[in-house]
Image (tube, grey):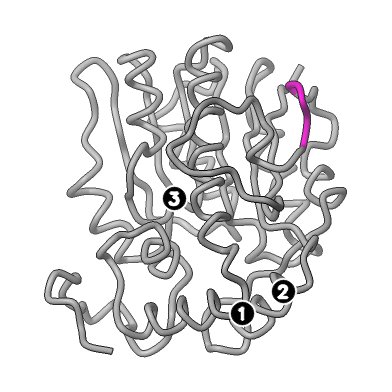
Amino acid sequence: MTEDSSAPAPSPKIDTTVPHSARIWNYWLGGKDNYPVDQEAGDQYAAIFPGIIDVARVQRYFLARAVRFLAGEAGIRQFLDVGTGLPTVDNTHEVAQRTAPSCRVVYVDNDPLVLVHARVLLTSSAEGSCDYLDADLHDPGTILDRAAAILDFSQPVSLMLMGIMGHITDEDAYPIVRRLVSALPPGSYLTLADGADVSEAFQKAQEGYNTSGAVPYYLRSPGQIARFFENLEFIEPGVVPCADWRPDPSPFTPPAEAYVYGGVGRKA
């Protein structure tokens, strides 16, 4: 495989010798912010589980529909998007500010490539704001402290956790989400989606990925994904295959099977 001349130049802080989930995801979505090692890992994964391309697209469309609901029907004007990943199309602030230009969005990631691209490519509307924090999801206290300096935590916030919790084991994942949600005021929302262990091929491909040197990602059952919404009021239809969450027309044919589950919950 030859290196794409349009790929980003390596940085001393960016390890291009092992695959990285954000860059592989970018590759599956047709982006150019990836390296040969990511392309190779992505191709190997897709050879075992071709449905991964559907997973990437379905999760992106779910994010867009959820944000439209939050900024529109729910009236949310503040978003805390943790584990942002590389910018693609219809990023959180773009969808939110198309609906309500005054929306304020804080992106959080700890990957240097993500942060470099975010600061260059993710620009806000004049009425709203778009900020970026270098912080680790394993340290929710730091995320909250830094976000509170930008967002108004006396007003509702939507916490976005898209395809990120699979990188964290159950022992830490549920307490982290509880810690983040507990700091948000009433009327806030949690939007979360992750890959589900509903396909043998998906699980086999993921097991291979987890031995590649990249940060492991563990699939959970739909019930385990729903558990993240403990003590929250589900927005109908609850935690479901992401393609089935308030679907609207898509340029892509709906996948025959659902491999990624998500939902939106409200804090009373």
Identify residue type, mark 1.
Ile
Q: Is residue 222 left or right of residue 167?
A: right
Q: In this view, does 265 lie to the left or right of 63?
A: right
Q: Which residue is labeled 1 in the image?
A: 48
- At x 52%, y 81%, the residue is 214
Q: Mark 2, mark 3: which one is toward the viewer?
A: 2
Q: Which residue is labeled 3 in the image?
A: 84
Please tell me how many numbered marks the rendered image carries.
3
Identify residue type, mark 2.
Ala
| Magenta part of the chain | 235-239
The answer to whether mark 2 and mark 1 are in CB contact below 8 A is yes
- Vertical placement of residue 12 versus 259, above or below: below
Residue 237 lies in the magenta-colored region: yes
Residue 12 point in image, percent of width and height: 23, 82
Choose between 120 and 142: the one closer to the eye. Answer: 120
- At x 37%, y 85%, the residue is 37
Q: Quadrant of residue 190?
A: top right
Q: Compute the Cα span from label 2 to label 1.
A: 6 Å
Q: Residue 201 carries which label?
A: 2
Choose between 140 and 213: the one closer to the eye. Answer: 213
- Vertical placement of residue 74 versus 266, above or below: above
Residue 199 lies in the magenta-colored region: no
Q: In terms of sequence position, does the residue under pointer 1 or pointer 3 come before the other? A: 1
- At x 27%, y 65%, the residue is 33
Choose between 210 and 32: the one closer to the eye. Answer: 32
| Mark 1 residue element | helix
| Mark 2 residue element | helix
- Vertical placement of residue 106 versus 135, above or below: above
